[in-house]
Amino acid sequence: MPELIVVANRLPVEPVYLDGDPDQEITGWRLAPGGLVSALESVFRTEEAIWVGAGSELLDVDHGNLHLETVSVDARDMHDYYEGFSNSAIWPLYHDAVVTPVYHRHQFRAYERVNKAFASRVAEIAQPNATVWVHDYQLQLVPGMLREMRPDLSIGFFLHIPFPPSALFAQLPWRRQILEGLLGADLIGFHTHDDARQFVYSCERSLGIAAYEGTMRVNNRRVGVGAFPIGIDAEGFSATAAEPHVLERARQLRAEMGSPTTVLLGVDRLDYTKGIDIRLKAFAEVLQDERLDPATTIFVQVAVPSRENISQYQQIRDDIEMLVGRFNGSLATFGATPIHYLRRVLEREELIALYLATDIMLVTPLRDGMNLVAKEYVASRNDDTGALVLSEFTGAARELAQAWLVNPYDTSGVSEAIVAAAQAPDDERERRMRAMRSTVFTTTAQAWAREFLTALRTGVASAHATVADDRDQARIPLEQLASSRHLLVCVDYDGTISNIVTDPDAARPVPEAVEALEMLRDLPNTSVAVVSGRALDNLRTVSAMPDGIHLVGSHGAEVDVPLELDPSQRRLLDQCTAAASELVAQVPGAFIETKPGSIAIHVRQCEPKAGANLIRHIVMGPGRYPGVLGRHGKEVIELSVAHAQKADAVRSLRQRFDASTVLFVGDDLTDESVFADLSGQDVGIKVGSGESAALWRVESPQDVALLLHRLAQERSTFNL
């Protein structure tokens, strides 16, 4: 019997009709292309597996190493489980309640019954100690049920949609049952670290289960929680896009549209989470303002029918089709219709040809777990042309940072991004596309499947962990960092590679840390930077960093060159300094550090209560001046008139060096913007205690030095 069992709501097959005619009888079944099948295809080539899904008995099914098993479900239960609880309660809730979730007890009871039917079927067919991989929001109770039935099994669960903020999840009447069901797994995977963190917060809030980096402890078991961003079959899309007949079809499509100057494309399921209506309004706004020529600009929207028996889906379809008619009615001419609307499914080759015929891809969902359409478009652009406008509320935005990122709720912002992408120079678009293609071809669907199964089978969930044992550096994925194409190593200064001292001007870096940074600097395809809140000149003086290690000061406002304020910023900073000086003069031990774009009020030498009161008065006084940004640190508050964040600096460095992977190490609240911004194969490490968005942790600057030294040694063994 196979040792791997995949469990999903649907079976991975599609019917084969007599003479290829859907109106004729079904003569057999074949594997459906795309989706999980593509991701797991490489696994199925090397080992036998069983796929369990809902359906009636399948006759004459033979798919090589893959065997199919069905779960028979009563029609009424299937409706209440799928259209009901799964898609009227869980789907909208997990997508930030874009529409109001509907909660019915009888639908949840059906959800329980169907999940139990799946669990029972798996328990019946699984051999001892088999690996079971459960997929998606329809089956969140299966891991817990299966754990009770078959405690010998190794169980993984992956959520293919977002997980909501913990405060939003708390409204679910059956939140405990869902969380307890998921915690029956040995490894729970999400697309992003943000989703994984929200799950952990929900467990702490609703179940009172403590989380430690790498694992959660549940009934004397270790449950791994982590981020595993899914990819696509990039090589497959690229190969199809290079086929001569597909290239010719792309040329035909362009000609059939009237050979327009600019073609924009949206491809989505017809779903209220996809933001199609806002996208249409943004496009219409661009044409109405004549920022692009209505006579030579076309927007093609492919809307794939979905769940059309659910009222919210019927409504969004009607709304979109009304908008298409309205905008075409007002913007079309006798020779040009600006919006081409297709409500249908396109065959794979036709879709790729359409990708190739498109200048700008619009992927602007209101919320999405990953969004593979964005990656498909990028993988298809073999000549590095084209532009991607991408919602920042997708998992893909964490990996495809070179896209034109937009807030999909901001119609004006989307329209501005469309114009910017259309008018960008060719070399800029090619640079962005090359960087995105590098990511898409690295984080493939096949790599995703292998990484998840390896983590599940070896128990090394910490390689992708959201919470981990603070003392175990061995869990930090050094090999993942060491093997990256171009590694950017960024470290904070105070408290990270330098111990915290009473006098900031006396803070010197740990010698072993400097040595390790030099080792990394000297490796090929490796860039090193110190990113600090200190003024750049002060950082340069106290750190005495060797040449080749880049310095970023003032939280990113000063990158290799000192910051210069404009006159209004200078006046505002002077006002802050005067007001803060009056307050500081009343508190023994407090002092002000002056920086080019800010002042820092230090209280580490004060009596604790007096220091806390001073910071409170600073916040309520000059901290509230218009144009002033307050940043809290360890026994310090900074008032800045130059509103840079470390995340902006690290993002800029990533683009500057074309880095594929970032390691960031920091200890302070000001470092959290970077930790929250990391994505894909990036690694964030928090130094010391306290809440953090970082996924890993070490204790001290001495531990940082050891970690960097180990990374340098590991990376030196790779042929870069």
Image (spheres, rainbow, N blue to C red):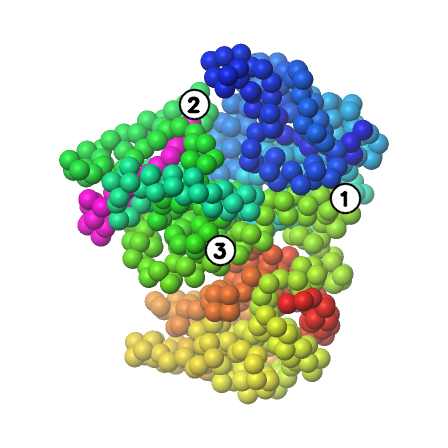
Q: Eyeballing the image, is 524 above or below 124? A: below
Q: Position of residue 330 (x, y in %)?
A: 18, 36
The segment highlighted magenta reads 278-305
Residue 437 at x, y = what percent?
50, 54
Quarter occupied by residue 598: bottom left
Asked if residue 420 lies in the magenta stretch, the reply is no
Q: Secondary structure at mark 3?
A: helix
Task: Report helix, strand or loop for mark 2.
Answer: loop
Residue extending farthest top: 25
Mark closer to the chain start, 1 or 3: 3
Quarter-of-image position of residue 402: bottom left
Where residue 480 sits, quadrant-wise, is bottom right
Numbered-mark total: 3
Mark 2 highlights which residue? Answer: 308
Which mark, residue 436? 3
Does 131 sit left or right of 205 as displayed? right
Q: What residue is shown with label 1?
A: 457
The numbered mark, 2 or 3, whose residue comes first in the sequence reads 2
Give the amino acid type for the residue marked by disc 3 in the picture.
Met
Residue that sits furthest to the left in the current view: 334
Please name which of the two marks, 2 or 3, marks the residue nearer to the observer: 3
Q: Residue at x 57, y 72 (%)?
A: 527
How much space separates mark 1 and mark 2, taking CA atoms? 40 Å
The three-letter amino acid code for the residue at tag 2 is Glu
Amino acid type assigned to the residue bearing label 1 in the image: Arg
